[in-house]
Amino acid sequence: MAIEFSAAVSRIPVYPAAEAYALPEDVALLASNESPEPPLEPVIAAVAAILTGVNRYPDPTNAKLRGALSDRYGVPASRIAIGNGSCDILLAAGEALLEPGAELVYAWPAFSVYPHLAAATGATDIQVPLNDAQEHDLDAMAAEITAATRLVIVCNPNNPTSTAIPLDDIAAFLRKVPKHVCVILDEAYCEYNTLDDPDASIDLLAKHPNLVLLRTFSKVYGLCGLRVGYALCGSDVFVTAVNQVRQPFFCNAAAQAAAVESLKHGDAVAQRVERSIVARIEIEDGLGELGIRAAASQANFAWFDLPTPEGREPAEFEAEIVAGLSARGILVRAGTALGRVGALRVTYGTPQQNQRFLAGLGELLG
Ligand SMILES: *Cc1c(COP(=O)(O)O)cnc(C)c1O
């Protein structure tokens, strides 16, 4: 007899892992929105230094990291949650807020982890389609909030579509959301957003105790392999609740040390953002030369519909292009798995990788 699992296991979607981690050295990994740059040298040194002490459990209160984040952002440490990646905080929020009968509202396509929350808890998922510009339709989302709504997630800039909405629109949306409904603003890519200062959303916390700004060291800081994320919250009750539903040691010692050190190197991080914005222009121009108009990216990746030829199935054509790029050593993400048939998501790489991608796509499109 096979093991009998809970109903949640049959509901939870399996995360679409990027293929083929065993590929040769020179593969261009443009599938997971990672930084193409290695961690900063002093960050690597800080991690190495902590390793001699890992016979001890890590600090379960993450005191140094929360203190450093509090200094950096002006949010009291009691209102800062830490996680084993920001996904850990997201999943804990699902567990702490949702249950059968409760509703969760988010846009779609958005981050592939969001459907996990309702599936794991038995809550009801309300997916609100993006508008034609592939942006959140905040009015339509506000209209979906009912007495049963416990959580609303807004992803800004949005993964996988790369688009962002102005902070003023988000502020207006927040004014419409009842105060007992938690709003998570997933800002995994906020550092790359040129529409608004990444620090500007922090001002909203003072007015909205139900607001949570979810951020990560995975993207611009280049630490996704260590797993550390954080949430800046409008009130400390969110922090208490997500800590309650998790194991005590949810952030390892190396990740904590790396994050603390990273916060000391704002200039290096700003230079990374500049390089990423140069890549954005290169990729958008290169796609333009192939007759492709990408969504207006405010992130470290491009999102676009492939020019599916007349008479071809978009899904089939998309698979063919992804396979063709893969054969050329370039890994990207197929749109179908992310919620839009016939689309591609391509992370900005090094200048060389970006040129390789553009040349490969050009060949495949003839
Ligand atoms: C990458 C990403 C995250 C970060 O996940 P971590 O668990 O911090 O690595 C969160 N939200 C979105 C939308 C992302 O794309």
Image: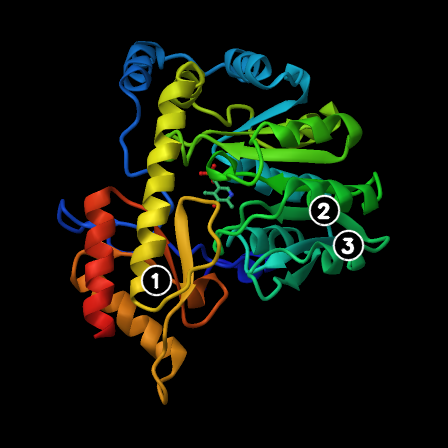
Amino acid type assigned to the residue bearing label 1 in the image: Gly
In this picture, is 132 found above or below 208?
below
Dividing the picture into quadrants, the one containing residue 46 is: top left
Q: Is residue 154 left or right of residue 189?
A: right
- Mark 2 or 3: the one toward you: 3
Please provide percent x and percent y for residue 270.
40, 26
The residue under the point 59% across, 32% down is 246
User: On the image, numbered disc 3 is attached to which residue?
Assistant: 142
| Residue at the spot of label 1 | 288
Task: Say which of marks 1 and 3 sits in front.
Answer: 1
* Element at label 3: helix
User: Is ligand 1 closer than 8 angstroms to the Cβ of mark 3?
Assistant: no
Q: Is residue 297 left or right of residue 362?
A: right
Q: Nearer the viewer, residue 30 or 337?
A: 30
* Foreground of the two, 162 or 57: 162
CA–CA distance between discs 1 and 2?
38 Å
* Callouts 2 and 3 close, C-beta under 8 Å: no
**Residue to which mark 2 is pinned:** 151
How many C-alpha atoms fall within 10 Å of the one at disc 3: few (<14), some, or many (≥20)? some
Q: Earlier in the sequence, mark 1 or mark 3?
A: 3
